[in-house]
Amino acid sequence: MPDSAPSPAKTPRVRFAPSPTGYLHVGGARTALFNWLFARHTGGTLILRIEDTDVDRSSEAMVEGILEGMSWLGLNWDEGPFFQSQRLDLYKATAARMVASGHAYPCFCTKDELEQRRQQAAAAGRPAMYDRRCRQIPADVAQARIAAGEPAAIRFAVPESGTTSFTDAVFGAIEFQNAEIEDFVLLRSAGVPNDRSSSLGWSNGIPTYHLSVVADDIDMRLTHIIRGADHISNTPKQVLQYRALGAELPIFAHVPLILGPDKTRLSKRHGATSVIAYKQMGILPEAFRNFLALLGWTTGGGRKQILRDEKGKDREFFSSEELIQLFSLEGITKSNAVFDNDKLAWFNAEHIRAMPVEQLSLRLEPFFQQAGLHPSPEKLLAVTPLIRERIKFLRDAVSAADFFFVAQLAPYDPADLIPPKGNLTSDAALAIRILQHVQQVLATCSFDPESLDQTLRQAAQSLGLKAGPMFQTIRVAVCGRKNAPPLFETMAVLGRELCLARIRQAEENLQPLA
RNA sequence: GGCGCUAUCGUCUAGGGGUUAGGACGUGAGAUUCUCAAUCUUAAAACCCGGGUUCGAUUCCCGGUAGCGCUACCA
């Protein structure tokens, strides 16, 4: 049996533990999401812990970036944020306990020596593991050297034989040979990079990741560790420490990685990896959550049946409430998943369409502001239903609807005013005739979609033209483009004055072609 | 290199000893419409390879291959 089973009755405590050496990226966001869904599903507690023990690479700005990403995604936590850099005493005490119990020992090898030996080992084709030479040093000798101020790291004394194993909630039983695990460093020595706190003299007092995760996970009474599968190989080092400290093992649930389209690990060169970039594109957080949740998780996990809709098709569109209700560790997939931008765009479009217009128009507003357009709330609300089926990203709303909000249309090709084939003639003269006639009828008719529909179809009839091609002329005149929302609704929103002005302008634009 | 994990349409996935291997995104075609979308219909598209086990394997087992991860006094 790999380990003692944790008592299942406890209410779950989970954590998201990013390292502030970068912004919140897509992979981290999904890990955070899974932890959040799990906590909310089980009524457990989500803790946010900032792993900033790499002083050289961590920054305040990145902490803020991560917090911004979390709040945009709507992932709230219950405890924290805790900063590991402020919990150094815990790590020192934890290391001391392991030294005292003989599970850890001081190592006086310098970084250079280690590097040299590693290279020699590599050249000789030997495994590049630490040779454990300082483990031989008698305790009293080591104590004396430390007392004399000789820099030392603390290493964990890994058993030289046997195996270490654990049961992963996603991957099942995983076993490692102890002989393959090196005596890893728990506490860094002095004079080594990351030297900011010389509180111990011989050590800089800063733990490595291996120590700080375990010390904190125990201290924070975490029951489940949900994190990226890149940590599977680290897990035995942690299990060993749990044992050394006499602590109960949490349940590990490793989540497969997210890859780029070329199937390598997702990184900057794949384009946007910061979740904030998705915010800026106009992805809705609820859509992002939906998309991310289904990357590496399905409703059909374990013995459950996949969720189907009325037509018997697998459901993929979920509100966040549904995700919370449905989420389970059993549904987590084992294999890595490629991040598919097209599918994300589709999810976003679906969520856009599912959203009440009032809400959508509020979400759209900042994007117009950013583009230098300042629609009134009323007008934006009127425009929103006209474009909501035409945009995949909120940002697209600007290019789809800018003509509603500008005084002067952007220049367009006057040739576009000429109605497409479908009428006997199709030239500039015809376009002018249309525009002139239309100006007359529009001067007096009611400006609601129904009346405009009726009026303009009548106009086509009296001109002896097919309505469709003729509408195209009006559309270009009024919108300044060939593709736009439905004509009558659009005109109704624009109003009589603006429509007439633009049609007059179009007539002028056409003169050179006539 | 060593160790670990994984392997179903291009992508996300369902399924599971006997199935027409299901769905979604994307792609093609068609319908509809005042354009563009949306919507509807439809088509093409997958069980990595080799051995077992079995009456029968895509499914179970083993091996190979490939991909990914780890291999730091990074996390």
Image (cartoon, grey):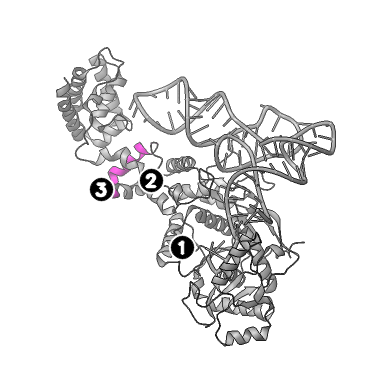
Answer yes or no: do the residues labelled 2 and 1 have beta carbons within 8 Å?
Answer: no
Q: CA distance from mark 3 to mark 2?
A: 19 Å
SS label for mark 3: loop
Which residue is disc 2 drawn over? A360
Q: Residue at x 73, y 68 (%)?
A: A160
- Is residue A447 visible to us here? no
Q: Camera-side residue: A63 or A377?
A: A63
User: Which residues fall within the magenta stretch?
Assistant: A369-390
| Earlier-in-chain disc, 2 versus 1 | 1
Q: Secondary structure at mark 1?
A: loop
Residue topped by disc 3 = A372
Q: Choose top left, top right, bottom left or bottom right for residue A448.
A: top left
Residue in front for this viewpoint, B21 or A233:
A233
- Which subunit holds the residue at mark 2? A
User: Which residue has dot 1 on it?
Assistant: A21
Does the magenta run of residues contain A291?
no
